[in-house]
Amino acid sequence: MKQIDRSPIHKHSLKPFLNCIDHSVSKKVFSIYKDEESELLITTPRPLDQELSLYYESDNYISHTDAKKSFVDKIYKFVRSYTLKRKLKLISTLSNGYHTILDVGTGTGDFLAICKKNGWKIKGVEPNNKARNIAESKTGMHVVSDINDISSDRFDVITMWHVLEHVPNLKSYINSLKKLLKENGTLIVAVPNYKSYDAKHYKQFWAAYD
């Protein structure tokens, strides 16, 4: 997992891990350090808060654009239709009936749409304006831009599908999520696995590093 936090948990255990280029947008070179104790990866230098959104302003970032132009886009959409069904099956095992779900980093809203279709009461968080508008058109629901805009709701399930590695302030964000969960609620987190075969094979060219 790539954590981009200004204050690593174990500064004394940070070791150089990899240098790679932001191919999608800035073409800048970033260093990635490994926290030997937590086994998290830390991006250095971390983009400033006011700059962070610029790294997602790319027509090639399909999670925000819903593009269908290239062959890769079409493959992505085919795979996504399969994974959406798996995600729905996973959350369904956590409930005896239809309940409430918050999807953080909802992108263009496909996961929320399939949840709503299957009876879940949905809420989404998506910072990117373009993606948020697409998500709202797919779900017919208001999608907030910031988790702090959700003040009183509490959820049975909160999902973060490949989102946590994009969060600037990890500890405070997790605490915010805990406040939004019901007492016996479940937080589901999926992150890129830098120990996976494809990460080791592609190294600095692995898409998840970009």
Image: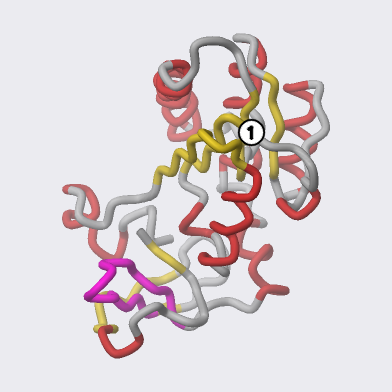
State the residue in front, 173 or 80: 173
Disc 1: which residue: 155
Q: Is residue 129 magenta?
A: no
Q: Could you tell me what secondary structure mostly forms the magenta stretch?
A: strand
- Left or right for 122, reference 177: right
Q: Is residue 43 magenta?
A: yes
Q: Which class describes the residues within 10 Å of circle 1: few (<14), some (14-19), or many (20+)?
A: many
- Give the magenta range: 31-44
Say how the picture is coloured.
Answer: secondary structure
* Residue 55, picture quadrant: bottom right
Please count the marks in the image. Answer: 1
- Left or right for 125, reference 38: right
Residue at the extreme bottom: 12
Residue 17 location in percent, x, y? Answer: 25, 76
Mark 1 is on which residue type? Phe
Residue 127 sits above or below residue 210 on the image: above
